Image: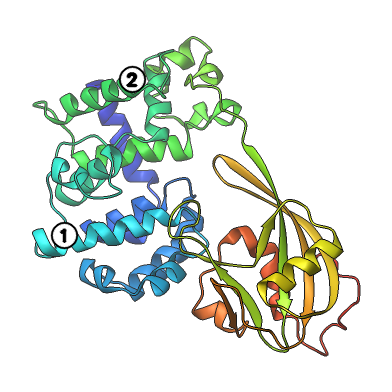
């Protein structure tokens, strides 16, 4: 490990990407960015991060934020439980740490939504603590450097790499913890890429990599076989009641808990079944037009969706959990999951732009 730290951190100083959260190394900025970056690319996160910290510049602002505003700020990133956990954690930080994120990794891991990786990132990058920050990129780099065929999805294997890094960061010749951790992450993100995408020719530690020497780069890391996602069929109703539409509030628990969504029902419904379902909600349908099928992929489930655009007369008393809103409000006040993005564009269709009843094609 000591042999890689010098060339690795030297490479990082010349090749690191400029990021707003790196510029200040604020504990709050590191925390927000690391939560956003989970399963999301840096370039995608940049505008979301800027918008989020502009609206909520510190822990206190996050703790006090209205939930609807919070979810709207997070809209498009998915995994809304993450931002809810952030708010829960921020309130604990306000109560127990005077609004300042703790520096100790154990204290950080005790907060909702912060695991060993995020705790290590905050402690090392923001506070200079000798803590490892081992994510998927780091696991890939280290499994190749050491030529290890141990499954990186095994918690014991990850813990072993964390111990290895911790020993390096507490040694007499230890590099700066935040720089070293970020260098490992950056190498995995830019050079030591998965499978045949790995760019070994530009790797600063290629001469120390067993996988490269043994022509085993594409074989590592070893991971568990992924389980196939469950497929769920749904029918989505896009309702136009004059210049208003209908939204539904999801339950407070489960997938997309507490989010506003377009009305939807289990299974693929025929036109007649969709009209009957609309009536049960309290919608008086005047005309119905099929919309293109859509698909959305979550981590463990796929939604295969059939859509209908429904022109409605005056609504009756709506069923519990449904609300009539102006489509413009969905841009500012209602956070609708990206699963419905393929259909929410039809909320903006107004009279004169497209004759109702005309066949709808993908915009």
Does residue 18 appear in the picture of this structure? Answer: no
Mark 1 vs mark 2: give the one in front: 1
Image quarter for residue 280? bottom right
Q: Please state the horizontal and vertical placement of residue 166, each as a whole percent of the image.
A: 18, 28
- Taking the view exactly as shown, the residue that stands out farthest to the right is 358
In the picture of the structure, the residue carrying the numbered disc 1 is: 93
Residue at 39% across, 45% down? 15
- On the picture, is 347 further left or further right than 135? right
In the picture of the structure, the residue carrying the numbered disc 2 is: 157
Image quarter for residue 134? top left
**Location of residue 305 with respect to 152 vertically, above or below:** below
Colouring used for the render: rainbow
Q: Please state the horizontal and vertical placement of residue 320, each as a whole percent of the image.
A: 55, 72
Residue at 49% across, 19% down? 220
Location of the N terminus (image quadrant) = top left
Does residue 360 appear in the picture of this structure? Answer: yes
Image quarter for residue 253? bottom left
Q: Please state the horizontal and vertical placement of residue 101, each as a whole percent of the image.
A: 16, 56
For label 2, count other residues whose C-alpha is less than 10 Å away and answer few (under 14), some (14-19) or many (20+). Answer: some
Residues at circles 1 and 2 in contact by the CB criterion of under 8 Å: no
Q: Secondary structure at mark 1?
A: helix
Q: Earlier in the sequence, mark 1 or mark 2?
A: 1
| Foreground residue among 334 and 11 | 334
Label 1 to label 2, Cα distance in Å?
Answer: 31 Å
**Location of residue 172 with respect to 270 vertically, above or below:** above
């Amino acid at each position: 490990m000591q042999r890689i730290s010098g060339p690795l951190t030297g490479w990082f100083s010349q090749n690191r990407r400029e990021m707003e959260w790196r510029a200040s190394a604020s504990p709050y900025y590191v925390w927000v960015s690391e939560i956003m970056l989970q399963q999301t690319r840096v370039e995608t996160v940049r505008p979301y991060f800027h918008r989020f910290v502009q609206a909520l510049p510190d822990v206190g602002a996050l703790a006090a934020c209205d939930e609807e505003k919070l979810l709207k700020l997070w809209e498009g990133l998915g995994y809304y439980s993450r931002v809810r956990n952030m708010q829960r954690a921020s309130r604990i930080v306000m109560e127990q740490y005077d609004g300042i994120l703790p520096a100790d990794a154990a204290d950080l891991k005790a907060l909702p939504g912060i695991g060993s990786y995020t705790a290590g990132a905050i402690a090392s990058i923001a506070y200079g603590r000798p803590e490892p920050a081992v994510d998927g990129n780091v696991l890939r780099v280290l499994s190749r450097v050491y030529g290890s065929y141990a499954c990186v999805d095994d918690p014991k294997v990850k813990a072993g790499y964390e111990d290895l890094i911790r020993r390096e960061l507490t040694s007499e010749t230890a590099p700066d913890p935040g720089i070293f951790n970020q260098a490992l992450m950056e190498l995995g993100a830019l050079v030591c890429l998965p499978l045949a995408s790995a760019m070994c020719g530009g790797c600063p530690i290629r001469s120390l990599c067993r996988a490269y020497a043994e022509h085993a780069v594409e074989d590592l890391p070893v991971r568990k076989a992924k389980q196939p996602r469950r497929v769920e069929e749904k029918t989505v109703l896009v309702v136009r009641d004059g210049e208003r539409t209908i939204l539904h509030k999801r339950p407070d628990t489960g997938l997309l808990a507490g989010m506003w969504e377009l009305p939807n029902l289990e299974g693929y419904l025929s036109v007649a079944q969709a009209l009957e379902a609309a009536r049960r909600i309290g919608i008086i349908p005047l005309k119905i037009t099929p919309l293109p099928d859509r698909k959305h992929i979550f981590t463990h489930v796929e939604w295969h969706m059939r859509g209908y655009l429904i022109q409605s007369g005056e609504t009756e008393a709506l069923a519990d959990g449904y609300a009539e809103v102006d489509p413009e409000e969905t841009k500012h006040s209602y956070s609708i999951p990206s699963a419905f993005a393929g259909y929410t564009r039809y909320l903006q269709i107004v009279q004169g732009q497209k004759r109702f009843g005309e066949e709808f094609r993908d915009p």
